[in-house]
Amino acid sequence: MQEDSLVEYGARRTIITLTAILCALLEIVDTTIVNVALNDMRGNLGATLSEVGWVITAYAIGNVIIVPMTSWLSQQFGRRNYFAASIIIFTVFSFLCGNSTSIWELVAFRFLQGIGGGALLVTSQTIITESYPAKKRAMAQAIYGLGVIIGPTLGPPLGGYIVDNYTWPNIFFINIPIGIAATLLTLQFVRSPKYSEKKSINQVDWLGIFLLSITVGSLQYILEKGHEDDWFESSVIIFLTIMAIFGLFFFIWRQFTYAYPIVELRVLKNGNLRIGTFMSFILGFGLYGSTFIIPLYTQSILGWTAMQSGMLMIPAALTTAFMMPIIGKLLSKGVRHQLLVAIGLFIFFIYSFWGYKILTPQTSADNFFWMLIARGAGLGLLFIPITTLALSTLKGQQIGQGAAFTGMMRQLGGSFGVACITTFIANRSMMYRSDMVSLLNVNDTDVQQRLALLKNGFLSKGLPVDVAQQSAYKVMDGMVTKQSAIMAYMDVFLYLGFAFLVCIPFILLVRQKKDKTPLPDLGEAMH
């Protein structure tokens, strides 16, 4: 059968699987590794905080624009050629990023690196899925999931180590030897499907490409920069929101009316893919949102280094890796995808509520340990069932199209999660701060005693009376700011937990279409 023509066996399948995971890992690590080097980049390139933020934003926009086009581009140029070209683009622009001499040069190279990187993630998933027979796809998704979930966790500690011991360009240069090896392995081992003839230049949906770029580019910018630009107080955000809405409307109209669409939306008629696409958004929200919030808290409130924050996340990633084969085995025994997802959401609720309970100005790494282990277990229960369910009843080129939809929704879910969390923390912190300040009465005995204590401490260090008084007020102000931020973080965890809890009944009510091929015991899958 045509859809089984790419199934591989033995050592060849192992090499293809490792190559695809390496590329997925390369792309995802690069998404988070840069975060810890922004300060060094800013100093070295003479950039402002706002300008250096574009190093992350440009990469994310490049990623999101290319992901929906990957299936079409694979058909145009051949899967193997397109995948190899994407690795080469990613590697070349990694080299150029490391050699950038100005901030806007780096931003331009990061955008183009993101164009190459976006294809790696989705095409890796398609290659792995098609290299395994339909009955062993749960195992394929478990293997792919290792890269996707461990990647965001490896980025910060690896980046922290490189920045602390070397210089920031090295976070880009480490991609070069891996990229060269992955390119050679791809050209040697990966095969291209022969699903359909490629389109002539006159049949290419240039308008669709333009509308898609405008829509997802605008949406990603809004999500990345909305908080910084104060959302709809900014004329740029308002303009891009209008562009995204009209762009999406005309893009959907174009895809349904043009004979050769750039994105095959009709594949969403598959019920399992629709469920999987929606769940991927929730997964992105939970995965990237929770990966974002813990390092932010430990660094901004507890004063940890990027390296310490990154190391904290590793046991949770290892827990997810440990869970993968177990969950794959449960799926092979016929356990419903929805049940595992519901359990995963409930564990995420426990993790979030746990976070709400333990946050203090002195929370230690030990306090975080078991809470993050719970997060790792929850992620494992979400990732494999969602990706397996989404692609379970797709055949042939539909697998690539389905992988593109789920990949894009996971990315947008993550951007949406980070944007919501950032805005929520800022608004809640301001609210709690104003409430606290209104309760701080300078005539209150407790307040006077605290200020006197702080003032005497500064006087004992030899400061003049007026400077000691001002310093005491500053410390008091800092304490209020810190406490209001902690309360805002507590609220984030609490609300996130309830959001996951609310999703459970909806997930359980969903009816999935049965795949006609039963899943085997996963012990066989590596043979």
Image: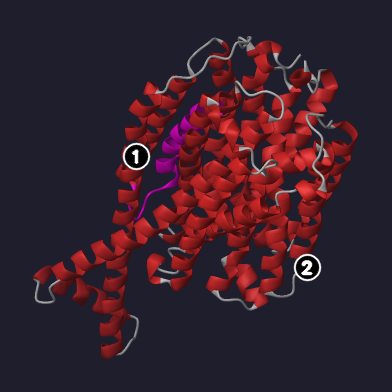
* In the image: residue 329, left or right of residue 431: right
Residue 56 position, x and y percent, is: 60, 60
Range of residues picked out in magenta: 359-384
Q: Which of the two discs, 1 and 2, sits closer to the camera?
A: 1
Residue at the (44%, 55%) spot, across then down: 419
Residue 304 visible in the picture = no
The reply to whether dot 1 and dot 2 touch (C-beta < 8 Å) is no
As for residue 362 lying within the magenta part, the answer is yes
Number of callouts in the render?
A: 2
Query: Looking at the picture, which amino acid does disc 2 mark?
Result: Asn
Residue at the (65%, 35%) spot, across then down: 401
User: Which label is found at residue 499?
Assistant: 1
Magenta-drawn stretch, dominant element (helix, strand or loop): helix
Q: Earlier in the sequence, mark 1 or mark 2?
A: 2
Q: Which residue is mark 2?
A: 99
User: Residue 391 sits in which quadrant?
Assistant: top right
Residue 229 visible in the picture = yes
Q: Nearer the viewer, residue 74 or 503?
A: 74
Residue 134 position, x and y percent, is: 67, 17
